[in-house]
Image (tube, grey):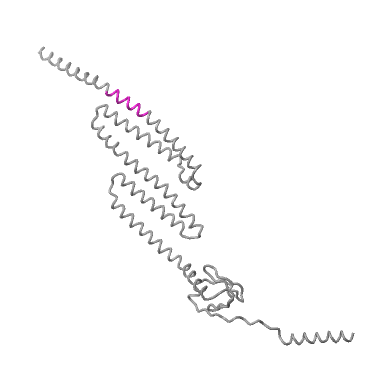
Amino acid sequence: MQNGIFAWAEALETATRDVLTQVFAYVPQLAGALLLLLIGWLTARITRLVLVRGTGAVASALGRIAPAPVSRRLSPSSQAVTIVGQIGFWAVLLLFITAAAEAAALPILSAWLDQIVAFMPRALAAGVVLLVGYILSGVARDAVTAPLVAAGLAQARFVGVVVQATVLAASVIIGVAQIGVDVTFLTIITAIALGSVLVSFAVAFALGARDLVANLIGIQQMRSRFVPGQTVRLDSTEGEILEFTPSAVVLDTDAGTMTIPGQRYSATSTLLLPPKPIQEQPDSAVSSGTRNTGSSTSKSTGA
């Protein structure tokens, strides 16, 4: 009985000694892991500070160098600057957490973190592509919309949106490809959607510009046959041609100055009238003038 108790006590002592030996042997590894975490946390905070201030400095430099519309588009908001700083913070901290897991001899956690760290460059590249694509899409939209609005095109805003969507779609496809995803199906869907939008825009533009094109063609044909100063009759409208505008003809009619669209020339018959004769004074006015002259002469003679 006593031998059994002594054997049990000896086994417990041996197990305790082995556990303590392993714990004491693991303490340096744990201390190294904790030290790496502390260094990583400090480095991550410094990285976040540098990114936030560096992004603000770059935005200020672009605001002084680039034109006002471009600088407004490129200038990041405070939320965007904060997000950039947080991304840098967690990226650096994740690297140190991975190193600490390896130092602490945690193989499962270390392997899982290694996969995340290996994925980080591709995710960062995809994020940069999406960010640049978003900025460029806004710049492209403004660059396309401004001249079209100045030209008076009714679909100017729509064209700008189509250009912006095209640039964004291209950046999304490139960004997803950076992650390692097969973008063949996404490319096909995007091409179909973009083609449908472009065809719809072409049809809408053709329908909207139909009258304008008809006026331009009609005026060009009319310019080749008539010149200002001639008198014409367009259907029931008669007048002298004063001038040709890019899409209409201006006539001097009895009712006043009338502007007629060019497509009227192609849709109705046009008659060139002979020039109006110069109106002569009536005979009665001439004879009256002669009598008056004779009377004046006789009066002056009598006098």
Q: Nearer the viewer, residue 144 or 194?
A: 144
- At horizontal 30% and vertical 24% (from top left) the residue drawn is 32
- At horizontal 43% and vertical 57% (from top left) the residue drawn is 159
Q: Is residue 44 left or right of residue 58?
A: left
Q: Nearer the viewer, residue 11 or 54?
A: 54
Is residue 37 placed above or below 226 in the rendered structure?
above
Residue 266: x, y in percent?
Answer: 48, 75
- At horizontal 31% and vertical 55% (from top left) the residue drawn is 189
Q: Is residue 47 left or right of residue 254?
A: left
Residue 83: x, y in percent?
Answer: 40, 38
Is residue 124 placed above or below 107 in the rendered structure?
below
Q: Does the segment drawn in magenta span residue 214?
A: no
Image mark count:
0
Residue 262: x, y in percent?
Answer: 51, 71
Residue 33: x, y in percent?
Answer: 30, 26
Q: Nearer the viewer, residue 244 or 174?
A: 244
* Residue stretch rendered in magenta on the structure: 29-41
Is residue 211 placed above or below 125 in the rendered structure?
below
In which quadrant will I find the C terminus? bottom right
Q: Does the segment drawn in magenta span residue 36?
A: yes
Q: Quadrant of residue 202?
A: bottom left
Is residue 77 placed above or below 206 in the rendered structure?
above
Q: Quadrant of residue 127?
A: top left
- At horizontal 29% and vertical 50% (from top left) the residue drawn is 183
Helix, strand or loop for the magenta stretch, by majority: helix
Q: Nearer the viewer, residue 225 or 271?
A: 225
In which quadrant will I find the N terminus? top left
